[in-house]
Image: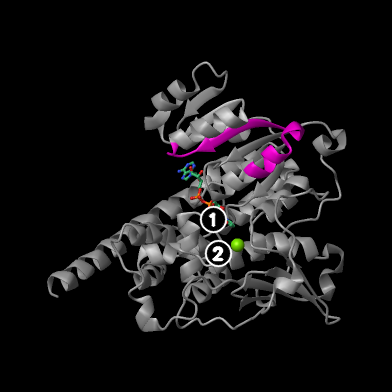
Amino acid sequence: MIERMTRVTNNQKAQGRRTVTVLGSTGSIGLSTVDVLLRERDAYDIMALTAHSRVDALIEQALHVRPRRAVIGDERHYGRLREGLAGSGIEAAAGSDAVVEAACMDAEWVMAAIVGATALRPVMAAVQRGCTLALANKETLVCAGHLILEAARRHGTTIIPVDSEHSAIFQVFEQEHIDSIDKIILTASGGPFWNCRQAELVRVTPRQALAHPNWDMGAKISIDSATMMNKGLEFIEACQLFPVAQSQIEVVIHPQSIVHSGVCYKDGSFLAQMGVPDMRTPISYALGWPRRMDSPVKTLDLTDITTLTFHKTDDSKFPSLALARQCQQQGGSAPIILNAANEVAVEAFLQERIGFCDIFAVVEETLADSTSNKPTTLEDVFACDEKARQDARAWVTHKNTHMRASVVGG
Ligand code: NAD
Ligand code: MG
């Protein structure tokens, strides 16, 4: 649960330059974060930038932004990184431990924009040294929410959600009036296919699924958005962040992505945050918090909006949300298994090894096969994650064999 902090962090009091690290700086959120930072260049010193494999993008970004250190997760690109940064005075490092070390560097504000559960170690490292953590990555809260939030409490780390829905809720959630909250409304764009027939879903290609109608995002979250698993993960994320019962969180399809989510109070008020769909708004909010800063995002012109529509979700077509609800209800390692199976299935779909609807099947089958336990340490989480990935890979192979057999068989 997020306790709205009244404490203003030392760096904000000092009003001096603020040190910032961006984990996952070459991705969609990472690039938007750097864009926001560069518009107030004099206010920030960049401590570290990290990326996984896009070494040339990292070199170009580092030469422009001039962090103290640039880290590439995939060690095979270390030579290229060192060569690209030679003579610049920017330190080069490589490997997953170096990504964790970057998170440990003494930046006051850290953006966690690495995709997937692989962000868990660096996120925990940042949390454990006490900082303001802008958390875009959702998989870490799904897999280890209680461990991360407990560590944040212990180490005085402030977590500001960056996911647009959670940022919206955070902005209108009256911590001091929790008893007056009726429910949280989590909006979902529904992705490109929410209105498609089941028969059309089966034939969806990765290219179609990557083309989100409103948001420009990384590949994994774009597919999650198309399967509604994104909303499933966000549902679990909301359960971790906000102190309400699971039954008080309602998901509503809102295809225009203008109302980014909100809170219904028992007096009949619905407080929502609205804006054009651009992640630079929640990023700016997290960067400026507890103040508000200017952002390059254009202000919503209400007279431009002709229609705002809201629809019920359809669990029979998109079972992801129901699966996420079940896993959250079940607790223990169920959300870890859900997330791991989904990551494996999404990767296999992007590689065209399984079909779109097979993503649901791989997740369901992996969950059905597994037994849930209660992880109490990060090591428990990693063990459970790895086991679920192995099981999911086996299901992917099974589906892939069937897919090829049906193609060969005509
Ligand atoms: P992306 O794929 O565009 O970028 C991911 C970043 O993570 C890249 O910089 C990549 O180099 C890095 N990365 C990937 N694998 C890594 C590894 N093994 N080790 C270290 N770094 C690694 O993803 P994105 O769309 O920017 O999303 C990032 C996170 O933010 C995801 O968890 C996503 O769910 C969440 N999020 C994204 C959006 C969005 O609009 N893109 C919105 C809300 C939440
Ligand atoms: Mg979101």
Q: Quadrant of the N terminus?
A: bottom right
Task: Work out how far the residue at label 2 is from the one at label 1, CA to CA, in angstroms.
Answer: 7 Å
| Residue sitting at the far left | 409
Q: Quadrant of the C terminus?
A: bottom left
Question: Residue 12 bears which disc, if any?
Answer: none
Using the image, determine if residue 9 lies above or below residue 172. Answer: above
Q: Which residues are magenta?
A: 35-54
In the rendered structure, which amino acid carries the disc numbered 1? Glu
Q: Is mark 1 within 8 Å of ligand 1?
A: yes
Give residue 408's position: percent from left, percent from top.
13, 70
Q: Is residue 98 visible?
A: no
Residue 243 left/right relative to 75: right
Residue identified by numbered label 1:
139
Q: Is mark 2 within 8 Å of ligand 1?
A: yes
Q: How many marks?
A: 2
Using the image, determine if residue 44 lies above or below residue 309. Answer: above
Question: Residue 233 bears which disc, if any?
Answer: 2
Dot 1 falls on a residue whose secondary structure is: helix
Which residue lies at the image location 65% right of the left edge and 71% below the top edge?
A: 186
Determine whether label 2 and label 1 are within 8 Å by CB.
yes
In the rendered structure, which amino acid carries the disc numbered 2? Leu
Q: Within the magenta stretch, is there residue 98?
A: no
Residue 310 left/right relative to 74: right
Give residue 202's position: percent from left, percent from top.
34, 76
Give residue 355's position: percent from left, percent from top.
32, 69
